[in-house]
Image (cartoon, rainbow, N blue to C red):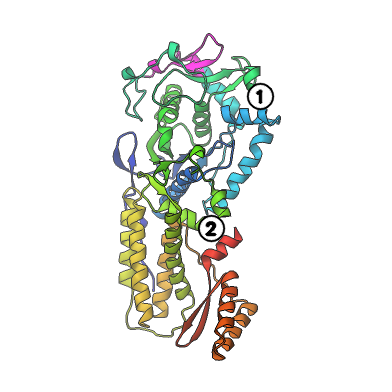
Amino acid sequence: MQISFDPKAFAFQLVNTETKKKEVVRPLDGIKVRLYTCGPTVYDVAHIGNFRTFVFEDLLCRAIRFFGMAVIQVMNLTDVDDKTIRGAIKNNVTLDEFTRPFKEAFFEDLKAMNIVAADHYPEATSYIQEMIVMIEELLKDGVAYKGSDGSIYFAIAKFNSYGKLSHLKLESLQHGASNRVEHDEYLKESASDFVLWKKYDPERDGKIFWESPFGPGRPGWHIECSCMAKALLGETLDIHAGAVDLIFPHHENEIAQSEACNKKPLAKLWVHAEHLLVDHKKMSKSLGNFYTLRDLLAKGYSGRVIRFLLLQSHYRMQLNFSFQALDGAKTSLARIDECIVRLESFTGEKVGGLTLKGYLEGILFEFAKVLSDDLNVAEALAQLFEMIRHINSLYDKAALTKEDVQATLEVLQKMDAVLGVMDFEKAEIPDEIQALVQQRATARLEKNWKRSDELRAELSQRGYVVEDTPDGARVKRNKIMRVQNKE
């Protein structure tokens, strides 16, 4: 049975933060979607709020491919800013020595979350020369200037469309040289001439600086992304993605400096993921509700379960994290696993009769349809679970054929190409597990219920579940526990 699916039959649309309208994703060059995604600042391990954004960006990449388009993704690593420099100085190490362990931890975490690797992970420290060149161009064009403190600033009053992404009115904001803000971590409700190059300050920067035509110093935060994006993807991106808290001032400032320099739009589409809350509160160490991915893995949750929780709400809606919700995600994922295990272990020989071709193609069509509407993953999951309910019902009635089973697994694999949470890895039941199952069967025949329960518990501890059926005991692997143990 061949399942028909034409990805080009769907117009994949996203809500553009800049226009506030749904717009079709279509590569500007007709070849590849050029996607720039904001990555971590590597001064610590990433927290689950960060991973809400990273999972969304991965979902976006997967969806682009699902709808038949090629994509080239860049995810930056911010390894020079106020936080990384402070950390290096505090620990009396070089900037690279301080940030390297957090970069390595980030890639380990991406693997745990089944996030597909980006094509490029540029480190800001590798693009200092490109930043100097852009700053020189901005100075030459008169939209940047040297302040009395020796640092270089961008004059936002000279960029007429400043505020177009955040929809803020320039005249209602504080701005100008008298209001410029020299540091990176400044209040988001005020706008100022922002720093492009910070003059070296031995007390603040220790031994960390680069030489430039403007004197020793280091780049401001905003200029980094503009230069890495341009170097790897060109002057105009198809999509720029990130978290909603980056809209202003970071992405607004990216637009200003990039477009003032290149005289071209920075991005065709801007998409942003909303905040993650913990028990309906902002995540904060002071509130005791701050969790890294590693905190949750240490509590026994697998990366697959965490990923499932983080992707199941629409990206433009706030996501509330709780351990109750995480347990609910674990239960939902177990339903998917159960269906896959049943299909993988199908031994029926029935041929002909009921065929699911039309039904499966209809479900896949609806899955793609809602997904193409601004990544409506909640509705896409609803289609998935409706299919699982229907397939389980037919399985229980012995109404499935081999072809039905193979086609259903094919559809699930197509869906999971986007979701990235299913486990299709087949595994033989080891001999020692089969021996424990046999010992348990013997204990049950002898009505030794205590021993039977002990053996069930041992099997469970090893990652296997035993089901007692009219045809005898059936053992299957616990996929969630198996993945957890691997991690």
Give the residue displayed 42% in from the left and 34% down from the top.
245
Q: Nearer the viewer, residue 2 or 310?
A: 310
In the structure shown, which secondary structural element does the residue marked by tag 1 occupy?
Answer: loop
Q: As displayed, is residue 228 above or below residue 191?
A: below
The stretch in magenta equals 137-159
Which disc is residue 388 wearing? none
Q: Nearer the viewer, residue 90 or 152?
A: 90
Disc 2 vs disc 1: which is toward the camera? 2
Gap in Å between the C-alphas at discs 2 and 1?
Answer: 39 Å
x then y, percent, for residue 409: 43, 69
x then y, percent, for residue 77: 56, 37
Q: Which residue is mark 1?
A: 208
User: Which mark sits nearer the N-terminus, 2 or 1?
Assistant: 1
Q: Which residue is mark 2?
A: 302
Residue found at the very far top of the displayed protein? 148
10 Å neighbourhood of mark 2: few (<14), some, or many (≥20)? many
